[in-house]
Amino acid sequence: MTRLIKRYGSRKLYDTEESRYVLLEDIAAWIRQGQQIRVVDNKTTEDVTAQTLVQIISEEGRRGTHSFSNDVLHDLIRFGQDAVSSGVQRIQEGVDKFVQASLDRLAPVRKARDEVNLLRTRLEELELSLMEMEAQKAKKTPPGFSKWGGEKPAARPRKAAAARTRDK
């Protein structure tokens, strides 16, 4: 979620989430923690986020705490948004290469995962085959007989009684 900051004509910054005035240092800290911010002019509702971020960088530069080299700042001015986009793209490519290299080192884990998937598939096939065999066996079982072979227990007394009646 993006944190909304309102900038007043007096250049005061008001955090709408915490309902208090904040300093540029507070905003910088939130950004370093991964928070997204949006700064709007209270009177015009114009988005002034970029100007505020530049102001944060400028203030840090005056205090000697900025993390940008002169070359990066020159490129940023020279190429504008393209410099940022290409920098992000280079970082993303580096991360992708790192992740791929890490995965390649995990070949035994990948092999084990593939074997487990194969075993799972074969187990499902075996269960399906057993269910089909039971269904076929149930269809072929003659009346009065169980599907496991032999006569049903309930059928035996009738045959025995019928045999006794015949013998008399």
Image (spheres, grey):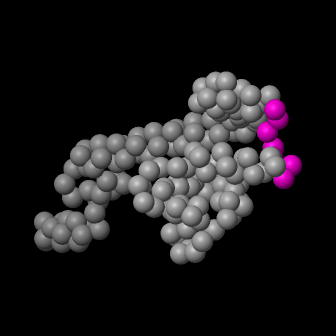
Residue pushed farthest bottom?
19
Q: Main secondary structure of the magenta part?
A: loop
Front-most of residues 42 and 132 = 42
**Boundaries of the magenta span:** 63-70
Q: Is residue 32 visible?
A: yes
Residue pushed farthest right?
64
Q: Where's residue 102, x and y in %?
A: 76, 35
Q: Where's residue 1, x and y in %?
A: 50, 58
Front-most of residues 4 and 7 = 7
Q: Is residue 167 visible?
A: no
- Residue at horizontal 59 percent and vertical 46 percent from the top: 51
Residue pushed farthest front?
10
Front-most of residues 12 and 29 = 12
Q: Where's residue 27, x and y in %?
A: 65, 60
Relative placement, left or right, of 125 versus 108 is left
Relative placement, left or right, of 150 versus 74 is left
Q: Is residue 67 magenta?
A: yes
Residue 44: quarter of image: bottom left
Q: Is residue 106 magenta?
A: no
Q: Where's residue 115, x and y in %?
A: 64, 37
Residue 119: quarter of image: top right
- Residue at horizontal 80 percent and vertical 46 percent from the top: 61
- Residue at horizontal 68 percent and vertical 30 percent from the top: 76
Relative placement, left or right, of 45 versus 50 is left
- Residue at horizontal 22 percent and vertical 50 percent from the top: 142
Residue 73 versus residue 79 in the image, above or below: below
How many marks the image carries: the answer is 0
Q: Quadrant of the C terminus?
A: bottom left
